[in-house]
Image (tube, rainbow, N blue to C red):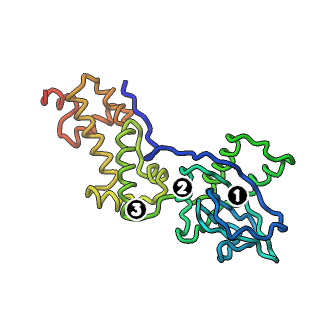
Amino acid sequence: MILRYHYFTKEPIVIPKLYSIGFASDTRVTRYGPTRRNQYLIHYIISGKGVFNGVKLGAGEGFITIPGMLEHYYPDENDPWRYLWIISYDPEMQSLIEMHNPELDKGIFKFHNIPVVEAVAEKLLSKDGGFDYSNTEITEMYLSIFNNCVQHKITDSSTNAKMYFDYTVKYISLNLHLPLLVSDICKRLGVSQPYLYRVFMSEVGISPKQYITECRLNEAKKQLLNTDFSISEISASIGFSDVLAFSKFFSSKMKLSPTEFRRWKK
C-alpha cells in the first residue's frame, strides 16, 4: 500500500507567546501617550471612534504598535470607541502583525467580522475578577479573532503567483492518490480558477488540469517500470478507483495498455 500525506502549510507554524488580552470601554481613560513601550500591541475597534497618532479610526479598523514605536491615542469625545487589545513581548509576534497587512508607516489596518471580537470581549467581561484565564485560553481567544477577522490572504503579485504555483505543485505531488479537482485546490488557496490557470500557463505553459494529468501519467510510468505493484495498486495510487478507467486513460496517452508498457519497457 502506498501512503501519502496531505500538505497544508508552506512555512513553519508560529504561535507567539501572548502576555495579556483585554477590553477597553471606560471613557474616563481619555488619552494614552505620547509614549514608547517595549511591547507589541494590537487593538481591534469594535464600535465608536478615536484617534491614533493623529489618524481618525472607527469600527472595523485597528492599530498596531511595536517596541519603540511612538504611540498616542484617545477616544472621540462624542462617540468614544470600544476596543479589544492584545499584548505580547515575543518577537515572533512580528509575523502575525505582518499578516494584518497594516499601513507600514502608520500601523493601521482593517478587519471584518466584528461580532467575533465582540464575543471575545463579552467573554472577558463575564469574569468580574479578571486575570482568571490561562495562557492557553488567552491564545485560543486571540486565534479565534485572527482566524475569523483578519484578512491575511496573500496579495496577488508576481512573487505570490510563484508561491501559489509552488504550493499547488507540491500539493498535487503529495495527493495524487486523491480525485484532485482544480476547483478544490483554488478553494484551498482562496483564488479563482482563471487566476490559477494564468499562473500555470506563465510557469509551465499548460493548465492546472493538464499538469495533474501529466503528473498522474508520469507517476504511473515510474511505478510500472520500477515496482512490482499490481495494476490495481498503481491505479489507486494515482487517483483512479476504477482499474478500467485507469487502463483507458493510460492507453489513450501511451498507445499501450499498462501491462503492455511494463512488458515492452522491461
Label drawn at residue 192: none
Q: Quadrant of the C terminus?
A: top left
Kind of residue at disc 3? Tyr
Residue at x-position 43% and y-position 64%: 156
User: Residue 39: x, y in percent?
Assistant: 63, 56
User: Residue 20: x, y in percent?
Assistant: 70, 50
Badge 3: how crowded within 10 Å, few (<14), some, or many (20+)? few
- Residue corresponding to mark 2: 94
Query: From mark 2 to mark 3, how far is it between C-alphas?
Result: 30 Å
- Quadrant hosting residue 54: bottom right
- Nearer to the camera, 153 or 73: 73
Horizontal arrangement in the rendering, residue 226 relative to residue 70 (left or right):
left
Residue at x-position 75% and y-position 42%: 133
- Nearer to the camera, 155 or 103: 103
User: Residue 239: x, y in percent?
Assistant: 37, 37
Kind of residue at disc 2? Gln
- Residue corresponding to mark 1: 85
- Nearer to the camera, 35 or 253: 35
Kind of residue at disc 1? Trp
User: Residue 259: x, y in percent?
Assistant: 21, 28
Horizontal arrangement in the rendering, residue 32 relative to residue 206 (left or right):
right
- Residue corresponding to mark 3: 195
State which tag comes first along the sequence, 1 or 2: 1
- Nearer to the camera, 11 or 31: 31
